[in-house]
Amino acid sequence: MSLLIKNGTIVTAVDEYQADILVEGEQITTIGKNLDYKAAEIVDAKGMYVLPGGVDQHTHFSFKYGDAVVRGFETSNAAAVGGTTTCIEFINQLTGKSITESVRKFEQEKVSGIAMVDYSFHGVVTDPTDELFEEIPTLPKQGIPTIKLFMAYKGACYHSDDSAIFRALQASKDAGVTIMVHAENADLIDVLQKQCLAAGKTAPMYHAVSRPPLVEVEATQRAIYLAELAEAPLYVVHVTTKESMEVVRNSYIKGVPVYGETCTHYLTLGKENLSKPDFEGAKYVCSPALRTPEHHEALWEALRKGWLNAVSSDHCGFDWKEHKHMGFDDFTQIPNGAPGIENRLGVLWTAGVETGKISRQKLVDVFATTPAKINGLSDRKGHIGVGYDADIVLFDPKWRGTISAKTSLQGVDYNAYEGMEQSGRADKVFLRGKLIVDEGKFIGQKGQGQFIKGKPFGLCYEGLK
Ligand SMILES: [Zn+2]
């Protein structure tokens, strides 16, 4: 099977040019001007930007909070229509089980035969025993070169203390495993939450009050000190404040191998959303909390200048009615997280490229290319180049529409960007050469997604060793 994509404007993380792309089987085999090849299928991409399929390195399909379970991989067609062709899912270690066993069980039960885009995994440490630290160096063989530890959520099974993080960093570095942290000070949040509740402050807004920027800044700096002491690289997920970003930036400049991502909602949505009446504020309860415009601007600047290097969705599809209402009388019981995998490209384009905050090349960089590198997928994913998987988005910059839960495939009863006017969309999306989205509609099949093995030393691309 061959496919020729003609007349499009290819955008990569470093350049932009007009050329045709020949796909044979599942891979890009030729890129050139005016390719004259009798392909089985020819697609005219005139007027379209040709982007690599997105790599979303931060998703939670099938996450559990008490009895509440988010929408699973049966809604991963939402990723496809949003131009994302690979997602990297966080899998909690099951108590008494290894990361590898936990990931394989999750894959068999919840992903394999269901996923509609390609996928890879991060392990999440919940049981930091000696066996776990011995397992860490073996993870790259399983195609899982990244694990996350939570500094936040005191009392939850997935909370890790400093000793667990430090030992994980020590165990990771020679094996090329990247340690990721959710950086918030769990003890401070616990005190502030209890003080809010004791004062009768139970509404969603107090989620942000009890998680002020400093609890993130402190934990970010502490995690970096641990990495410095362990001489290991560190990846900080969802950096949301100016000061946390500066801590990451300044430490990197000093020579500590620390990197960070932010997320679509931390660039665009403000904490005032948490004050919406009739419990609508609960829709915006995610951790860290949403911030103010001053922080949004600092994060855009950080992307422009390369101080943060990826934008993820932190997709976590809890329903408002069924799930978020668990915390109707107590904001600490509202499940944390919001859906967004479908909107990452549209919002980044509309709020970033159209406004001149980032270039098209930078969008490709933070949406696809660098997330692929960080997670050891960059020999196949995240770039339009010969030998890469033919994960290709034909992006129509002229399209206009309005974001709404009603038209979304996320399967959630709300959308955090509801009513936002969107510029441009993924018109056609190819997954390994197969057309899975046409005119913005999903036309692929359940189970077409494949596990992609991550390779170790994903952060090495910037000279780490
Ligand atoms: Zn997350």
Image (tube, rainbow, N blue to C red):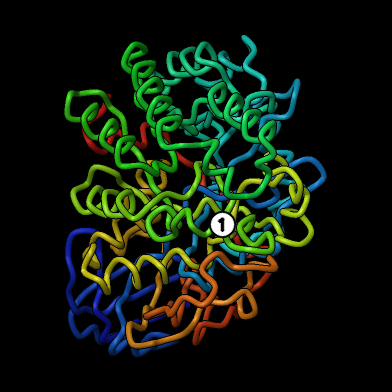
Question: Left of 259 or right of it: where is 343?
Answer: right
Question: Left of 417 or right of it: where is 334?
Answer: right
At 26% from the left and 49% from the top, the residue drawn is: 298
Question: Left of 174 or right of it: where is 206?
Answer: right
Residue occupied by mark 1:
275
- Ligand 1 is found in the corner quadrant, namely top right
Classify the position of the C terminus by image quarter: top left
Whole-percent x and y of residue 41?
Answer: 43, 87
Whole-percent x and y of residue 433?
Answer: 46, 71
Whole-percent x and y of residue 288?
Answer: 50, 41
Task: Decide which of 286, 262 is in the foreground and name it.
Answer: 286
Picture quarter containing residue 15?
Answer: bottom left
At 26% from the left and 28% from the top, the residue drawn is: 464
At 18% from the left and 70% from the top, the residue drawn is: 16
Q: Secondary structure at mark 1?
A: helix
Amino acid type of the residue tagged 1 in the rendering: Ser
**Can you name the residue that lies furthest to the right here?**
67
| Relative vertical location of residue 161 with respect to residue 443 in this rendering, above or below | above
| Relative vertical location of residue 206 with respect to residue 460 in this rendering, above or below | below
Whole-percent x and y of residue 261?
Answer: 37, 44
